[in-house]
Image: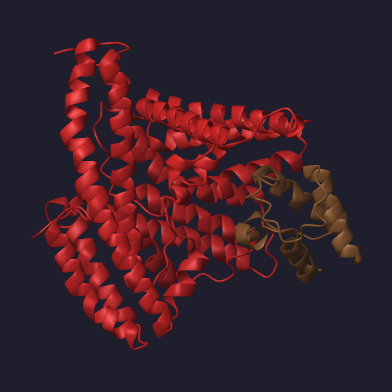
Chain colours: A red, B brown
Amino acid sequence: MMSFDPYGNPTYFILLFVALLPLMIGLLYGRRSHIYESVISFVFLMLTFGGIKWHTGIALIIYLIYQITLVWLYSRYRQRPDTPNKGWIFVVSVILAIIPLAVVKITPAVHHGASSIIGFLGISYLTFKVVQTIMETRDGTIKEFHPILFGQFLLFFPTISSGPIDRYRRFIKDYDSVPTRTKYLELVEKGVRYIFLGFFYKFILAYIFGTVMLPTVEHAALQAHGLSWALLGVMYTYSMDLFFDFAGYSLFAVGVSYLMGIETPMNFNQPFKSKNIKDFWNRWHMTLSFWFRDFIYMRLVFFMMKHKVFKSRITTANVCYVINMLIMGFWHGETWYYIAYGLFHGLAMVVNDAWLRYKKKHQAQIPHNKFTEGFAIFLTFNVVCLSFLLFSGFLDTMFFAARP
Amino acid sequence: MNETQSTVLSILQDLTGEDVSSNMDTNLFDEGILDSMGSVQLLLELQNQLGIEVPVSEFERSEWDTPAKIVAKVESMQ
């Protein structure tokens, strides 16, 4: 049987187009067939998780049964007329939802890089969706639980492998309705444009930076072994590759969703134009950073302010920045450089906020013009690229890997 | 100006140090007047001063990004 990485090669796109055509004609005539959508979802999930990767397919099925049962049980608990809404039941539910991901992330660290048998492509992104649904159920914003709809939300195949991370209520609203013809034509136009921009990003720019240039500069940097111009080259080349590869993939995922009449949120908004680190996180991998903002940072701040853990609101904000970003680091993987990357960004947010406060206080003395704005963008870009060099693991290879 | 509106505006002034009453349609997030921290403080103050419980899940940024929208939200929840 055939087996693909999502959006990996031309055959995948041809199959995708053939499969989507009837669905698109349907939407154009105001009809949405959940049966047909389920059939093509199933086919594309088989292409991703079947064939030689069948064991990941089994892992996915078991994972789904486990998580749907968990959310269903929690939802039943919250819907009881006398629901006590105990904090510890909520915490235990969230922990249970995270356990499979934690096992998958920790296994390579303790078993010399071996991957866990319960892992599959996209487990992180499904876990985000499960955890947010539990949190919104706790808050009472999600009142009813439909196991089938929830399953459709988790398994929505255009975004299953690497996001963007949608929200349950937003997804269901699109999934349960048919856009008007004008609206749908707009979506198709945008979707097609995104997919072609994605081709340009992923198959041309990311190819040039990642496949053509990166190995050369990496080789030169390894030869120099230490600070060198080549290392600076690795930093910029890797950063460009990372952006165009991931932004390209995200454009495919969003574009294909649009063709299916689902407005999956965008993941990138010109991140290298950011004026500071806070601005950067509003433009880079947005659905992830908004997830962390809404489900970790804000909740942590809310909890700490309500229980008056710290006297000063500045301390509260800073502690929460560092915790938030550290959790993001641990989520990326249990290696020193991912965790250092998280810490780096946590501290960068603290410094950023201190500067913003200083600037507000001394508004009269601090000049603001095109030049200072350009400098802010330049500085932010370099701080971000430095963090990506850390993130890439190249420093680990250069300094700590066994030399051949 | 009704009571809700003046309470909301005074909360915003306490939080941000800025009088936003003359710019009811300014985008508070784009202008850097409010951030996540400020949003949480706003939710807590709404709870303390007006007794309105807004869970964090209900805080959809685009629905709370101007003083006018915040006032309307609060009025709809009273």
In this view, A259 is above or below B58: below
Question: Which percent across, then down, holds residue B1?
Answer: 90, 66
Residue drawn where x is 76% and y is 71% of the image: B76
Question: Which percent across, then down, holds residue A256?
Answer: 30, 65
Residue drawn where x is 75% and y is 35% of the image: A313
Residue that protrudes farthest toward the front in the picture: A370
Question: Which percent across, then down, holds residue A120?
Answer: 28, 48
Residue A256 visible to the viewer: no
Name the side, left or right, on which A163 lies relative to A71: left
In this view, A81 is above or below A122: below
Residue drawn where x is 57% and y is 55% of the image: A135
Residue A151 figure quarter: bottom left
Front residue (pair A393, A39): A393
Front residue (pair B49, A236): A236
Residue A94 visible to the viewer: yes
Q: Quadrant of the N terminus of chain A?
A: bottom left
Q: Quadrant of the C terminus of chain A?
A: top left
Residue A241 figure quarter: top left
